[in-house]
Image (tube, helix red, strand yellow):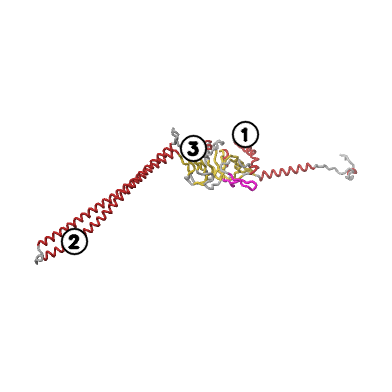
Amino acid sequence: MAQLFRESAKNRSPISLLGNIRVATPLRHTLWATSAFLLLGTVTAWLALGSYSRRETVSGQVALQGGASRIRSRVAGEVSSIHVKEGDRVAAGQLIATIATSTALPDGESLEKLTGENLAEEVEILGAIQSEGQRSSARAVAEFREQQQILQQQLGATEEQRLLSMEQAKQQQQLLSKYETLIADGYVTAIQVQQQRTELLNVRAAVSRLAVESSSIRRQMAELSASIQRALSDQRAADLDYRKQTSQLSSKSLETSASTRSAIVATRAGVVQSVLVKEGETVVNGLAVAVTAPTEAPLEAELFVHSSAIGFVKEGANVALRYDAFPYQKFGLSRAKVSAVSGVPLSTAELRDVYGRGDIEGPAYRITAKVEDQAVRLNDQRYPIRPGMKLQADLLLERRKMYQWVFEPVVKLARTAQEEDVNGVAP
């Protein structure tokens, strides 16, 4: 093939009078390419290193750990008095409030008042009878003891005479013995001996008479002692009967008071969180009068989760709280950790009646979360959270890598296609 150019033309100097030809690249193209590479690297790093936590937003409220006690009225009536105020510490059985349930008679008088007046009058009458009986018994005992003293004096005098008579009888016996010795010698006559025997018999008769008199006095003194004991025993019986009757009247008064007044007492020791009624208000049976909580009980979040989201909820899971009273845009989020998960779901009726959550359709599980901070902060100021505050919570459930989340639809599609191929569904 013939050459198209001469050798001299081919070997001519490549230097052109117009210079070299170069293709120029605009600066914006370079910037766009660099940005695209950076963006691609960032997305790749985000997909490889980033992670995603599935969130479930639920509603709830702030509650006291251990639960609050709602003290309810057992009767219907009017609040006559309230004996505590919010913040007071109460012991188990301490009086919280009194509910009046008195019934008015047709004439306008209070049944409680009339019954109380009648019972007071009966107690007064019993007291007067008891006082008069005590005075009468005291007088009788005093008279018996005075008679005892007189008889004691008589007994002393009689015993003294008896001892003198016995000494006299002893002397008469000695004299008679001498007379009987001297009668043989003719110093005394038989008449004198007989006279001496008569004197001795008279003295012995006097001793016997004085002994009988002493016995009679002792018997009278014993009878007086028995009379004193009977009087004292009768008085003790009267005192017991008085106490029994006053106790019955007191029981009747308590029954009347119980039928017209009802005492509302604390079921356990704690702190009064709220008093829900005022004096003069009318309450119905079962209405909450006050709320108490254990002393220094910490607060916790009480959450209600539907069954569709309960599968990944477990103890120790992180929770982000947003209190309705403290907008999170200004106060931020509060942290908590799941401390307990109920084993069975609650029905709509249980949520409404037990927890007062009529806005939740059951079934739902009750979850408690331990709040890390018992207050929210803003500009170095603390605002304490209070029981009953409504809140929204984000439950942080399963944690996955970003690439798993992004490519999950593709993986599912491929798995589905593979299963269909294996089962002979696909051609």
Residue under numbered circle 1: 426
Please give the range of residues in magenta. Answer: 370-385
Q: Is residue 189 above or below residue 37?
A: below
Disc nearer the start of the sequence (1/2): 2
Residue under numbered circle 2: 168
Q: Residues within 10 Å of mark 2 (few under 14, many from 20)?
A: some
Q: Is residue 414 above or below residue 199?
A: above
Mark number displayed over residue 375: none
Q: Position of residue 129 (x, y in %)?
A: 35, 43
| Residue 371 lies in the magenta-colored region | yes
Disc nearer the start of the sequence (1/3): 3
Q: Which residue type carries mark 3? A: Glu
| Residue 381 lies in the magenta-colored region | yes
User: Which quadrant of the structure image shows residue 250?
Assistant: top left
Q: Position of residue 341 (x, y in %)?
A: 54, 43
Q: Which residue type carries mark 2? A: Gln
Q: Which residue type carries mark 1? A: Ala
User: Which quadrant of the structure image shows residue 46?
Assistant: top right
Disc 3 on helix, strand or loop? strand
Residue under numbered circle 3: 78
Q: Residue at x 17, y 63 (%)?
A: 171
Which mark's residue is nearer the viewer, 1 or 3?
3
Q: Residue at x 42, y 37 (%)?
A: 114
Q: How far, Cα to Cα, is label 1 from label 3?
A: 78 Å
Towards the viewer: 353 or 258: 258
Q: Is the C terminus in the top left, top right, bottom left or bottom right quadrant? A: top right
Q: Position of residue 367 (x, y in %)?
A: 55, 42
